[in-house]
Amino acid sequence: MDSHPKCSFSRPIIVISRCLGFDNCRYDGEIVQFPLAETLKPFVEFIDVCPEYDIGLGIPREPIVIIEDIDDINRKLIQPATGLDLTDKMEAFSHLYLEKRDDFHGFILKSKSPSCGVGTTKVFPDAGTDEYIHHEGNGFFAETILQNYPDIPVIDEEQIKDPVKCDHFLTRVFVMASFMDACASCKIHALVEFHTANKLLFMAHNKQMMTAMGNIVANRTNIPVEKVYEDYTEHLMEIISEAPQSGSVINAFMHAFGYFSRHLSAPEKFGFMQQLQKLRKDASVIFELKAWFREMSEKYNVEYLLRQTFFCPYPPELSLP
Ligand code: SF4
């Protein structure tokens, strides 16, 4: 098992659709097998939710669908078999649920559901027809999350099968959990430590913004620490919101390479350069490169690199390929 003794990890809070391995709560009384939940359980705090069950629909229940009026873009949540309009109930539940607890770091939701789907839910023009409207949309619960928490990562059980998307999701939730711990202390030294450990990760996303964040932490104008945290939070949310581009990732690797390249033979250096070239075409090469950097950092005892979250953003037990 890969290990990385210099990194410690905060425990993120993840809200998850209950049918993803937690309970037989689907409309037909089924459960969705989702082994990743078991893998994640020792490292995250899961809060499972089933909006349809929680608004009082039983198990099993008649299916519900989203109906959209094309003219005024009115969306409704309808149970065609009973004619029930569940729109207000579901919207009220979603808002209340999210208001009650807002310390979560991410959401893993069930795709295609009229409640939980993220961009994959069929939207119908009229109850009881199979005719597709021109698009797939968000379920009602998911829509409330996306509108109210645009900075919190949301992924579904299909997207998370993609190693690069999964890596980005896990990186965001673990970085945010660790940042929240620093925020709780509201001490500048905690922010300095956080920034130092994440420097390469931020460089791999956006070097300019990483520098700006460093300047915020340096606080040369002595602004109140609360304001420092506020400014830093804005930048942090933005810098990790998008998956990093290969050019910036390569720059971060090149920067890190300088810490031990003098120890390497010519073939080892050549092998590294070849991997970087591959990375331009295949984002998944990043996993092999990070593993190699972890190995080299330990071999040559490069303390700075061993503490960088870039090479180990979440527990190694969750490491992809
Ligand atoms: S998709 Fe959401 S609402 Fe539907 S069964 Fe799963 S958790 Fe419940």
Image (spheres, rainbow, N blue to C red):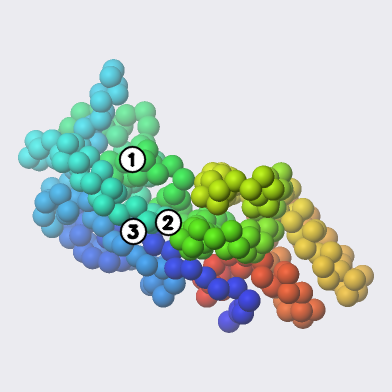
Q: Mark 1 points at which residue?
A: 143
| For marks 2 and 3 on the same chain, the one whose residue lies earlier in the sequence | 3
- Specify the quadrant of the image occupied by residue 66: top left
Residue drawn at the location 37% of the way across and 67% of the way down: 45
Amino acid type of the residue that numbered disc 3 sits on in the rendered structure: Ile
Task: Give the x, y percent position of residue 131.
Answer: 27, 31
Task: Give the x, y percent position of residue 191.
Answer: 59, 59
Instruction: Using the image, determine if residue 204 lies above or below residue 35.
Output: above
Residue extending furthest left? 82
Q: Name the residue under label 2.
A: 105
Residue extending furthest top? 71
Which residue is more in the foreground, 175 or 228?
Answer: 228
- Disc number for residue 16: 3
- Binning the other alpha carbons within 10 Å of mark 3 as few (below 14), some (14 to 19) or many (20 upward) gives many
Task: Give the x, y percent position of residue 206.
Answer: 68, 46
Horizontal arrangement in the rendering, residue 78 relative to residue 40 (left or right): left
- Contact (Cβ within 8 Å) of mark 1 with mark 3: no
Amino acid type of the residue that numbered disc 1 sits on in the rendered structure: Glu
